[in-house]
Image (spheres, rainbow, N blue to C red):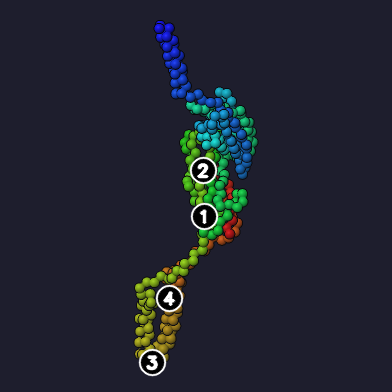
Amino acid sequence: MRGIVRRSLRLELVAGLGIALAVPALAFPIAVATTTTLTAQSGVSATCSLTNLAVRVTSASGVPAGTVNIEDGTGGGAVQLASANLDATGQATLTFALENGAHSLSAVFVGNASFNGSTSTTASVTISSQCASEFVVTTSKLAPTTAANTMTLTPGQAGTATITVTPLQETVSSLTAPMFVTLSCSGLSDQASCNFTPENVEILYGQNAGVASTMVLQTYAASTTSVSPASRPGTGSAPIAWAFLLPGALGLGGLAWGARRRRVVRRWLSRLSLMALVGLVTLLGTTACNPRYDYEHHGPVPNPATPAGTYTVTVTAQTSNGVTAIQQSTSFVLIVN
Protein backbone atom coordinates (compact mmCIF):
# COMPACT_ATOMS: atom_id res chain seq x y z
CA MET A 1 0.00 0.00 0.00
CA ARG A 2 2.82 2.35 0.90
CA GLY A 3 4.50 1.56 -2.44
CA ILE A 4 1.39 2.52 -4.37
CA VAL A 5 1.17 5.82 -2.51
CA ARG A 6 4.84 6.57 -3.16
CA ARG A 7 4.49 5.87 -6.88
CA SER A 8 1.40 8.15 -7.01
CA LEU A 9 3.27 10.96 -5.32
CA ARG A 10 6.16 10.57 -7.73
CA LEU A 11 3.83 10.82 -10.72
CA GLU A 12 2.19 13.97 -9.32
CA LEU A 13 5.58 15.55 -8.71
CA VAL A 14 6.73 14.80 -12.25
CA ALA A 15 3.50 16.17 -13.73
CA GLY A 16 3.68 19.31 -11.60
CA LEU A 17 7.28 19.88 -12.59
CA GLY A 18 6.38 19.56 -16.30
CA ILE A 19 3.57 22.08 -15.96
CA ALA A 20 5.83 24.47 -14.07
CA LEU A 21 8.40 24.30 -16.85
CA ALA A 22 5.81 24.70 -19.62
CA VAL A 23 4.01 27.73 -18.21
CA PRO A 24 6.99 30.16 -18.50
CA ALA A 25 7.59 28.97 -22.03
CA LEU A 26 4.01 29.78 -22.96
CA ALA A 27 3.98 33.13 -21.15
CA PHE A 28 7.35 34.32 -22.45
CA PRO A 29 7.87 33.24 -26.09
CA ILE A 30 11.45 33.05 -27.29
CA ALA A 31 12.47 35.77 -29.80
CA VAL A 32 13.80 34.49 -33.12
CA ALA A 33 16.94 35.55 -34.89
CA THR A 34 16.93 38.17 -37.68
CA THR A 35 19.25 39.27 -40.44
CA THR A 36 19.59 42.91 -41.50
CA THR A 37 21.00 43.96 -44.86
CA LEU A 38 21.79 47.47 -46.10
CA THR A 39 22.21 48.56 -49.70
CA ALA A 40 23.55 52.06 -50.37
CA GLN A 41 23.54 53.76 -53.76
CA SER A 42 24.59 57.33 -54.48
CA GLY A 43 22.94 59.38 -57.18
CA VAL A 44 23.29 62.95 -58.38
CA SER A 45 20.46 65.48 -58.33
CA ALA A 46 21.45 68.65 -60.19
CA THR A 47 24.93 69.32 -58.73
CA CYS A 48 24.34 67.65 -55.37
CA SER A 49 24.81 64.02 -54.28
CA LEU A 50 22.03 62.05 -52.61
CA THR A 51 22.56 58.65 -51.00
CA ASN A 52 19.66 56.21 -51.28
CA LEU A 53 19.51 53.50 -48.61
CA ALA A 54 17.48 50.29 -48.82
CA VAL A 55 17.14 48.29 -45.59
CA ARG A 56 15.70 44.78 -45.35
CA VAL A 57 15.22 42.68 -42.20
CA THR A 58 14.43 38.97 -42.62
CA SER A 59 13.73 36.06 -40.30
CA ALA A 60 13.04 32.35 -40.60
CA SER A 61 9.80 32.82 -38.62
CA GLY A 62 7.62 35.54 -40.14
CA VAL A 63 8.22 39.11 -41.23
CA PRO A 64 9.94 41.30 -38.63
CA ALA A 65 8.32 44.57 -37.60
CA GLY A 66 9.88 47.46 -35.75
CA THR A 67 12.46 50.23 -36.11
CA VAL A 68 15.82 50.43 -37.83
CA ASN A 69 18.45 53.07 -37.09
CA ILE A 70 20.98 54.31 -39.65
CA GLU A 71 24.43 54.91 -38.21
CA ASP A 72 27.56 56.50 -39.70
CA GLY A 73 30.88 55.26 -38.40
CA THR A 74 31.98 52.20 -36.47
CA GLY A 75 32.43 51.29 -32.83
CA GLY A 76 32.07 53.99 -30.20
CA GLY A 77 32.38 56.73 -32.83
CA ALA A 78 29.18 55.79 -34.69
CA VAL A 79 26.67 58.62 -35.09
CA GLN A 80 22.96 57.88 -35.52
CA LEU A 81 21.62 59.71 -38.56
CA ALA A 82 17.94 58.80 -38.54
CA SER A 83 15.35 56.13 -37.79
CA ALA A 84 12.71 54.48 -39.95
CA ASN A 85 9.91 51.98 -39.42
CA LEU A 86 9.83 48.74 -41.41
CA ASP A 87 6.88 48.33 -43.76
CA ALA A 88 4.67 45.23 -44.05
CA THR A 89 7.40 43.46 -46.04
CA GLY A 90 10.16 44.16 -43.53
CA GLN A 91 11.80 46.90 -45.62
CA ALA A 92 12.56 50.62 -45.29
CA THR A 93 13.99 53.19 -47.69
CA LEU A 94 15.76 56.44 -46.79
CA THR A 95 17.49 59.23 -48.70
CA PHE A 96 20.36 61.26 -47.25
CA ALA A 97 22.41 64.28 -48.24
CA LEU A 98 25.83 63.55 -46.75
CA GLU A 99 28.74 65.94 -46.55
CA ASN A 100 31.84 65.39 -48.66
CA GLY A 101 34.12 62.61 -47.50
CA ALA A 102 34.06 58.89 -46.67
CA HIS A 103 31.14 57.37 -44.74
CA SER A 104 30.67 53.90 -43.21
CA LEU A 105 26.92 53.35 -43.02
CA SER A 106 25.14 50.55 -41.20
CA ALA A 107 21.54 49.65 -40.36
CA VAL A 108 20.66 48.49 -36.85
CA PHE A 109 17.39 46.63 -36.26
CA VAL A 110 16.28 47.43 -32.71
CA GLY A 111 14.37 44.19 -32.16
CA ASN A 112 11.37 43.42 -29.96
CA ALA A 113 9.78 40.63 -27.97
CA SER A 114 9.28 38.49 -31.09
CA PHE A 115 12.43 39.24 -33.06
CA ASN A 116 16.01 39.69 -31.91
CA GLY A 117 17.92 42.76 -33.00
CA SER A 118 20.62 42.59 -35.67
CA THR A 119 23.13 44.85 -37.41
CA SER A 120 24.02 44.93 -41.09
CA THR A 121 27.51 44.92 -42.47
CA THR A 122 28.85 48.41 -43.21
CA ALA A 123 28.36 50.02 -46.61
CA SER A 124 31.12 52.41 -47.68
CA VAL A 125 30.02 55.62 -49.43
CA THR A 126 32.33 58.40 -50.58
CA ILE A 127 30.85 61.80 -51.44
CA SER A 128 32.94 64.15 -53.59
CA SER A 129 30.33 66.25 -55.43
CA GLN A 130 28.18 67.64 -52.64
CA CYS A 131 26.69 71.05 -53.30
CA ALA A 132 27.86 73.97 -51.20
CA SER A 133 24.48 74.49 -49.60
CA GLU A 134 22.41 73.67 -46.54
CA PHE A 135 20.06 71.28 -48.32
CA VAL A 136 19.12 69.54 -51.57
CA VAL A 137 15.73 69.98 -53.28
CA THR A 138 14.27 67.31 -55.58
CA THR A 139 11.06 66.70 -57.55
CA SER A 140 9.25 63.37 -57.72
CA LYS A 141 5.82 61.76 -58.28
CA LEU A 142 4.78 64.00 -61.17
CA ALA A 143 1.16 63.37 -62.15
CA PRO A 144 -0.15 63.14 -64.77
CA THR A 145 3.01 62.29 -66.67
CA THR A 146 3.89 60.72 -70.01
CA ALA A 147 7.69 60.82 -69.70
CA ALA A 148 10.39 61.10 -67.07
CA ASN A 149 10.47 64.46 -65.29
CA THR A 150 7.57 65.68 -67.45
CA MET A 151 4.02 66.73 -66.57
CA THR A 152 1.40 66.84 -69.34
CA LEU A 153 -1.84 68.84 -68.91
CA THR A 154 -4.71 70.22 -70.94
CA PRO A 155 -6.05 73.75 -70.23
CA GLY A 156 -8.23 73.63 -67.12
CA GLN A 157 -6.46 70.56 -65.71
CA ALA A 158 -4.35 70.45 -62.53
CA GLY A 159 -1.21 68.40 -61.87
CA THR A 160 0.64 67.44 -58.71
CA ALA A 161 4.25 66.82 -57.73
CA THR A 162 6.16 66.04 -54.55
CA ILE A 163 8.93 68.48 -53.66
CA THR A 164 11.43 67.12 -51.12
CA VAL A 165 13.94 69.23 -49.21
CA THR A 166 16.74 67.03 -47.82
CA PRO A 167 19.14 68.71 -45.36
CA LEU A 168 22.83 67.92 -45.19
CA GLN A 169 24.07 65.95 -42.20
CA GLU A 170 26.46 68.75 -41.32
CA THR A 171 23.56 71.23 -41.33
CA VAL A 172 21.23 69.36 -38.99
CA SER A 173 24.01 68.57 -36.54
CA SER A 174 24.81 72.28 -36.10
CA LEU A 175 21.29 73.75 -35.89
CA THR A 176 20.46 75.73 -32.76
CA ALA A 177 16.94 76.61 -33.94
CA PRO A 178 14.54 75.25 -36.57
CA MET A 179 15.41 76.19 -40.15
CA PHE A 180 12.50 77.19 -42.40
CA VAL A 181 12.72 76.77 -46.18
CA THR A 182 10.28 78.62 -48.47
CA LEU A 183 9.18 77.08 -51.77
CA SER A 184 8.22 78.97 -54.94
CA CYS A 185 7.97 78.32 -58.67
CA SER A 186 8.73 80.20 -61.89
CA GLY A 187 8.63 79.63 -65.64
CA LEU A 188 4.84 79.32 -65.93
CA SER A 189 2.53 81.20 -68.26
CA ASP A 190 0.46 84.07 -66.82
CA GLN A 191 -2.58 81.80 -67.25
CA ALA A 192 -1.23 79.16 -64.83
CA SER A 193 -0.33 79.06 -61.14
CA CYS A 194 1.33 76.85 -58.52
CA ASN A 195 0.69 76.31 -54.82
CA PHE A 196 2.61 74.37 -52.16
CA THR A 197 1.29 72.55 -49.08
CA PRO A 198 3.12 73.44 -46.94
CA GLU A 199 4.77 76.46 -48.53
CA ASN A 200 7.36 76.61 -45.72
CA VAL A 201 9.01 73.35 -44.63
CA GLU A 202 10.76 73.00 -41.28
CA ILE A 203 14.16 71.38 -40.69
CA LEU A 204 14.91 70.38 -37.09
CA TYR A 205 18.10 69.56 -35.21
CA GLY A 206 19.21 65.98 -35.82
CA GLN A 207 16.76 65.49 -38.70
CA ASN A 208 18.52 64.02 -41.68
CA ALA A 209 15.54 62.76 -43.63
CA GLY A 210 13.86 64.80 -46.35
CA VAL A 211 10.77 66.94 -45.71
CA ALA A 212 8.11 66.72 -48.43
CA SER A 213 5.68 69.33 -49.75
CA THR A 214 2.87 68.78 -52.25
CA MET A 215 2.86 71.09 -55.26
CA VAL A 216 -0.38 71.69 -57.20
CA LEU A 217 0.04 73.22 -60.67
CA GLN A 218 -3.21 74.67 -62.07
CA THR A 219 -3.90 75.56 -65.71
CA TYR A 220 -7.01 77.41 -66.91
CA ALA A 221 -9.49 76.84 -69.71
CA ALA A 222 -10.92 79.69 -71.79
CA SER A 223 -14.08 81.34 -70.49
CA THR A 224 -17.09 80.22 -72.56
CA THR A 225 -19.79 82.32 -70.84
CA SER A 226 -20.79 85.50 -72.67
CA VAL A 227 -21.09 88.45 -70.29
CA SER A 228 -23.65 91.16 -70.99
CA PRO A 229 -22.70 94.77 -70.27
CA ALA A 230 -23.79 96.01 -66.88
CA SER A 231 -26.80 98.30 -66.84
CA ARG A 232 -27.51 101.14 -64.42
CA PRO A 233 -30.61 103.30 -63.98
CA GLY A 234 -30.32 106.44 -66.04
CA THR A 235 -27.77 105.15 -68.51
CA GLY A 236 -30.22 105.71 -71.38
CA SER A 237 -29.45 109.45 -71.38
CA ALA A 238 -26.38 111.53 -70.78
CA PRO A 239 -27.30 113.95 -67.94
CA ILE A 240 -23.78 115.26 -67.52
CA ALA A 241 -23.46 116.09 -71.20
CA TRP A 242 -26.84 117.88 -71.18
CA ALA A 243 -25.82 119.85 -68.10
CA PHE A 244 -22.90 121.27 -70.10
CA LEU A 245 -24.60 121.67 -73.44
CA LEU A 246 -28.08 123.01 -72.59
CA PRO A 247 -27.02 126.34 -70.99
CA GLY A 248 -24.57 126.96 -73.81
CA ALA A 249 -27.18 126.19 -76.43
CA LEU A 250 -29.71 128.57 -74.85
CA GLY A 251 -27.09 131.31 -74.58
CA LEU A 252 -26.10 130.92 -78.21
CA GLY A 253 -29.74 131.01 -79.26
CA GLY A 254 -30.29 134.28 -77.37
CA LEU A 255 -27.26 135.87 -78.90
CA ALA A 256 -28.39 134.82 -82.35
CA TRP A 257 -31.88 136.29 -81.80
CA GLY A 258 -30.62 139.67 -80.59
CA ALA A 259 -27.77 140.09 -82.99
CA ARG A 260 -29.36 139.49 -86.34
CA ARG A 261 -28.35 142.88 -87.64
CA ARG A 262 -25.00 143.25 -85.97
CA ARG A 263 -22.03 141.96 -87.86
CA VAL A 264 -19.69 142.09 -84.85
CA VAL A 265 -21.97 139.89 -82.78
CA ARG A 266 -22.29 137.50 -85.70
CA ARG A 267 -18.55 137.20 -85.82
CA TRP A 268 -18.41 136.39 -82.10
CA LEU A 269 -21.33 134.05 -82.47
CA SER A 270 -19.48 131.99 -85.07
CA ARG A 271 -16.46 131.81 -82.80
CA LEU A 272 -18.54 130.71 -79.83
CA SER A 273 -20.23 128.08 -81.97
CA LEU A 274 -16.86 126.69 -82.99
CA MET A 275 -15.74 126.59 -79.33
CA ALA A 276 -18.96 124.85 -78.31
CA LEU A 277 -18.47 122.27 -81.04
CA VAL A 278 -14.90 121.57 -79.89
CA GLY A 279 -16.10 121.27 -76.29
CA LEU A 280 -18.84 118.83 -77.27
CA VAL A 281 -16.44 116.58 -79.17
CA THR A 282 -13.97 116.68 -76.27
CA LEU A 283 -16.67 115.80 -73.71
CA LEU A 284 -18.02 112.91 -75.75
CA GLY A 285 -14.51 111.55 -76.38
CA THR A 286 -13.61 111.73 -72.69
CA THR A 287 -16.79 109.90 -71.74
CA ALA A 288 -16.21 107.15 -74.31
CA CYS A 289 -12.61 106.57 -73.14
CA ASN A 290 -13.60 106.31 -69.48
CA PRO A 291 -13.02 102.74 -68.11
CA ARG A 292 -16.40 102.71 -66.41
CA TYR A 293 -18.09 103.74 -69.65
CA ASP A 294 -16.23 101.01 -71.53
CA TYR A 295 -17.22 98.36 -68.93
CA GLU A 296 -20.88 99.45 -68.85
CA HIS A 297 -21.19 99.44 -72.65
CA HIS A 298 -18.89 96.58 -73.66
CA GLY A 299 -18.64 94.26 -70.64
CA PRO A 300 -15.58 92.37 -69.29
CA VAL A 301 -13.17 90.53 -71.59
CA PRO A 302 -13.44 86.68 -71.39
CA ASN A 303 -10.52 84.90 -69.69
CA PRO A 304 -8.07 83.27 -72.15
CA ALA A 305 -6.88 79.67 -71.80
CA THR A 306 -3.39 78.67 -70.72
CA PRO A 307 -1.40 78.81 -73.99
CA ALA A 308 -0.32 75.47 -75.42
CA GLY A 309 3.41 74.86 -75.39
CA THR A 310 6.35 73.44 -73.48
CA TYR A 311 7.48 75.17 -70.29
CA THR A 312 10.45 74.61 -67.98
CA VAL A 313 9.09 74.96 -64.45
CA THR A 314 11.72 75.80 -61.84
CA VAL A 315 11.01 75.11 -58.16
CA THR A 316 13.19 77.16 -55.82
CA ALA A 317 13.77 76.45 -52.13
CA GLN A 318 15.20 79.36 -50.14
CA THR A 319 16.18 79.98 -46.54
CA SER A 320 17.81 82.93 -44.82
CA ASN A 321 19.70 83.38 -41.57
CA GLY A 322 18.92 87.10 -41.51
CA VAL A 323 22.16 88.00 -43.30
CA THR A 324 22.59 85.60 -46.20
CA ALA A 325 19.92 83.95 -48.33
CA ILE A 326 20.66 80.38 -49.44
CA GLN A 327 18.70 78.71 -52.21
CA GLN A 328 18.66 75.57 -54.32
CA SER A 329 16.38 74.73 -57.22
CA THR A 330 15.11 71.85 -59.30
CA SER A 331 13.14 71.83 -62.54
CA PHE A 332 10.80 69.74 -64.64
CA VAL A 333 9.03 70.05 -67.99
CA LEU A 334 5.39 71.08 -68.32
CA ILE A 335 3.60 70.31 -71.61
CA VAL A 336 0.23 72.03 -72.19
CA ASN A 337 -1.69 70.47 -75.07
Which of the two discs, 2 and 1, labels the residue nearer the N terminus? 1
Distance between mark 3 and mark 4 Cα atoms: 30 Å
Position of residue 24 measured from the top left corner of the image (x, y, whole percent): 45, 20
Q: Residues within 10 Å of mark 2 (few under 14, many from 20)?
A: some
Q: Amino acid at mark 3?
A: Arg
Which residue in the protein does label 2 denote?
A: 212
Which residue in the protein does label 4 denote?
A: 283
In this rendering, does residue 336 appear at all? Answer: yes
Which of the two discs, 3 and 2, labels the residue nearer the N terminus? 2
Which residue in the protein does label 3 denote?
A: 260
Judging depth in this view, the residue of 194 and 241 nearest the camera is 194
In this rendering, does residue 134 appear at all? Answer: no
Q: Residues within 10 Å of mark 1 (few under 14, many from 20)?
A: some
Residues at discs 3 and 1 in contact (Cβ within 8 Å) = no
Q: Amino acid at mark 2?
A: Ala
Distance between mark 2 and mark 1 Cα atoms: 19 Å
Which residue in the protein does label 1 denote?
A: 158
Q: Residue at x 58, y 59 (%)?
A: 337
